Image: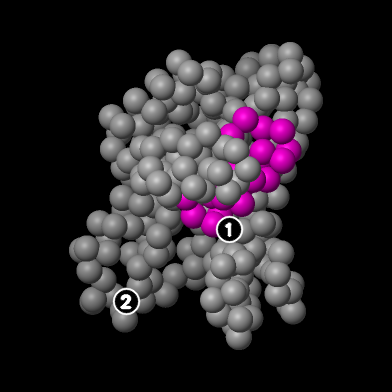
Amino acid sequence: MTEGSMTGSSLTDGRPLRVLVTGGSGPSGVAAAHALLQAGFDVFTVGSDTARIEAAAETAGGATPLVCDLGDLAAVRELQQELARTAGKIDGIIHLVGGWRGAQGIADQSDEDWDFLERSAVTTLRNVTRVFYDDLAASPCGRFAMVSSTAVGSPAAGVASYVAAKAAAEAWTMAMAEGFRQDGPADGPQHSAAVVFVVKALVDAGMRSRQPERKFPGYTDVEQLAAAAVGLFSQPAAELNGQRLVLAPVPAGAATT
């Protein structure tokens, strides 16, 4: 099948495209799942805590909640096998697992912070992409997206561990993009793509309500991220693949979404 075999969020046979949202318990995961559901996708959200991911999936509007430790390769393989058996192969992954740690400078970058960041930002991404790569590569509209930081382009000493982990995740994603180029059809248009969304930081309605005095300058709203995720599936794979897509910050004076 080629990109001409798709109609919006569905294939021409009427099957909705299946999208997995990892890190689905957080505000960005809820926003992405909601936007994808509203656009007609079949959405599965993954979290490590049963109660949280079930509540988030309900808040998103009816995504299918799944529990998995994405830092455990065997568990991710079980997740893929379960999905293949019960729903079918996955067409897209919006990877929203992350976390942040900072310090005063280079000398006090702790091993504990590095271990946390390496697992959350790098290991989870490696596991998910290794296990689901064949699904995405075979899909007529395979898409993978991760979220990185503008800090990678101008790393500061206090966030050395954080930017190093994000840079590693970006490099892995770019290598995945090259894999899609190599493994694409020889006699037709490319149909799978891997991209990096780049933001300074994310903001959501809950953050604004807790700190109404803050302006969050340069932050990108989770709703903007969600819209960008939906938009990936309507753009040609060859144009998207390997791109670092900088998402615009919230306009000055915008208080809600």
Residue 96 is situated, as x and y percent measured from the top left of the image, at: 49, 49
Residue 180 is situated, as x and y percent measured from the top left of the image, at: 55, 29
- In the image, what residue type sits under mark 2? Ala
Residue 223 is situated, as x and y percent measured from the top left of the image, at: 67, 57
Q: Which residue is mark 2?
A: 103
Residue extent of the magenta highlight: 25-43
Q: Please tell me in which quadrant of the rendered image residue 53 appears.
A: top left
Q: Which residue is mark 1?
A: 198
Q: Earlier in the sequence, mark 2 or mark 1?
A: 2
Q: Secondary structure at mark 1?
A: strand
Q: Secondary structure at mark 2?
A: loop
The residue closer to the viewer here, 223 or 212, is 212
Q: Is residue 62 visible?
A: yes
Q: Residue at x 62, y 66 (%)?
A: 205
Q: Is residue 164 above or below residue 139?
A: below
Q: Is residue 250 left or right of residue 73?
A: right
Q: Is residue 73 left or right of residue 222?
A: left
